Image (tube, helix red, strand yellow):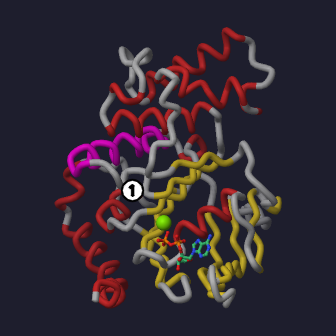
Amino acid sequence: MSAILAEPKLRLEGVTKEFPAPRTGVRTMAVSDFSLEISAGDFICIVGPSGCGKSTVMNMIAGLDKPSSGRIAIDGVPVTGPGADRGVMFQDYALFPWLTVRENIGFGLRNGTPGRGLSSKDLEDRIDRHVELVRLNGSENKYPHQVSGGMRQRIALARLLANGPDVLLMDEPLGALDAQTRLVLQEELLRIWGETEIREKRKTAVFITHDIAEAVFLADSVVVMSSHPGRIRRVLPIDLPRPRNEQIRADPRFAELHEEIWSLIRDEAYRATV
Ligand SMILES: Nc1ncnc2c1ncn2[C@@H]1O[C@H](COP(=O)(O)OP(=O)(O)O)[C@@H](O)[C@H]1O
Ligand SMILES: [Mg+2]
């Protein structure tokens, strides 16, 4: 056995984030002492009540915002800004309405660093592969407003993956979808992430949700956050077998894990509604 421990894919060390209040300028602590290591190929879900700092953590990993203190590194290299190694996906599809499905998927490849140096044939092949991956064949030439919400999120996912990022950062990407579409896309997402592949072929994924069942279904580990200030309450390994399918939702262990997470955030969730 090697004596050298593998560097985690993603490491957050004592990360804090303060925001000045808009009028008073008083600084409030949105995220406090957030430390987490994520191995390559892991699927991590972050859950917690609204306003606990989930998006703030994600934005800092994405390089869209800087920590007030602490360190974030990918493969041991400090994050100083956005990069092609990370792909970000949000709840609102952020698609270009004037571009077709296919043009949306190819946008980053054509206009950003990921497609640089690719021949036009390789570029088209890569777009084709991603259209197929998210099962959008036949809809390539439609515009976003002509397809369903579920399909729009597939487009956003395909565009993200076509750019070839190592790390997928998803902030409530399924939050705007109806319940049935959401369940279907959870399974699709696991397939696309690489659930049926060997671990080395899987992406590293950080997925934010406030839906506990979604977190249990998707994750290798669930990070439960509490608010004011936003910090990690518990990291729970999800010991359910993969690949996961509909039956797993009826597994008694699924219910146990759901209850355990709910009991950690219940009090705060009640407080937030009164
Ligand atoms: N740009 C900002 N300026 C000031 N306060 C912010 C900003 N972004 C987030 N916050 C505050 O930080 C806290 C965490 O927000 P956020 O990360 O969006 O929570 P979550 O995604 O868990 O709902 C909230 O209190 C929010 O009001
Ligand atoms: Mg948020």
Relative to residue 77, is residue 135 depicted above or below? above
Residue 188 falls within the magenta-colored stretch: yes
Residue 198 place in picture, x, y as percent: 52, 42
The N terminus lies in which quarter of the figure?
Answer: bottom right
Q: Which residue is mark 1?
A: 218
Q: Quadrant of the C terminus?
A: bottom left
Q: Quadrant of residue 140?
A: top left
Q: Residue at x 62, y 86 (%)?
A: 29
Looking at the rendered structure, the kind of residue marked 1 is: Leu
Q: Nearer the viewer, residue 185 or 177?
A: 177
| Residue lying at 74% horizontally and 68% vertically, measured from the top left | 66
**Predominant SS of the magenta segment:** helix
Q: Quadrant of residue 270?
A: bottom left
- Determine whether, in the image, residue 201 is placed left or right of residue 150: right
**Residue 167 in picture, x, y percent from top left:** 62, 50
Residue 155 to residue 18: above or below: above
Left or right: 97, with 177 as reference point:
right
Tell me the magenta residue range: 178-196
Q: Is residue 205 left or right of residue 91?
A: right
